[in-house]
Image (spheres, helix red, strand yellow):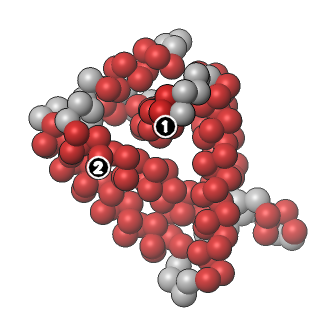
Amino acid sequence: MKTIEQWFAEYAVSHQNPTNKKIHFLAVPLIYLTVFGLLWQIPMPFSGFAAQQINWPLLLCLPVLGFYFSLSFVIGIGMTIYSAFVVLFLRWFESAVSMDVWLASLLLFILMWVLQFVGHHIEGKKPSFFKDLQFLLIGPAWILGFILRRFGIRY
């Protein structure tokens, strides 16, 4: 298995252009959020209190968080905190905004992916996930790693 540093170094190869980096710093966290949002309202196969508290994104993020923890405890904690923020935001959005979570997520998902491809066009390199789908999970961790380094936190 690759180390977090190896993943980040390989990901960074196609993310050197400052404009592409700025686009990714906006788009990647929002895409992560929208994936939760796209799954948010899919009914659970059981009913009752548990079905109100547990949903598909919460279940599916467990192996994703496991992947992050396998790379780095600090990255795992950071992505757990971000995932919790996403859940809180979506719960707020669901109750405060009249638009369905899935529809808002779909529109934002499409917009952010268009921006990402514009960024890679500017960069002149294909997105890393064309080489390995695991890079779809590395993107959010790479941004978190950048933020942690800015604060002098080792991962």
Q: Is residue 63 visible?
A: no
Q: Of tags 1 and 2, which is closer to the observer?
A: 1
Q: Residue at x 67, y 42 (%)?
A: 80
- Mark seen at residue 147: 1
Image vertical order of residue 2 relative to residue 29, above or below: above
**How many C-alpha atoms fall within 10 Å of the one at disc 1: few (<14), some, or many (≥20)?**
few
Give the SS element for disc 2. helix
- Mark seen at residue 44: none
Q: Position of residue 106 (x, y in %)?
A: 41, 66
Q: Which residue is mark 2?
A: 23
* Residue 46 horizontal side relative to residue 136, left or right: right
Residue 56 image-quadrant placement: bottom right
Q: Position of residue 95 (x, y in %)?
A: 66, 81
* Residue 31 horizontal side relative to residue 117, left or right: right
- The amino acid beneath tag 2 is Ile
Q: Position of residue 10 (x, y in %)?
A: 34, 20
Q: Position of residue 29 (x, y in %)?
A: 46, 50
**How many C-alpha atoms fall within 10 Å of the one at disc 2: few (<14), some, or many (≥20)?**
some
State the separation of the CA atoms marked 1 and 2. Answer: 15 Å
Q: Are marks 1 and 2 in contact (CB under 8 Å)?
A: no
Q: Residue at x 55, y 27 (%)?
A: 152
Q: Residue at x 79, y 64 (%)?
A: 53
Q: Earlier in the sequence, mark 1 or mark 2?
A: 2
| Image quadrant containing the C terminus | top right
Give the SS element for disc 1. helix
Q: Residue at x 63, y 49 (%)?
A: 83
Q: Is residue 15 visible?
A: yes
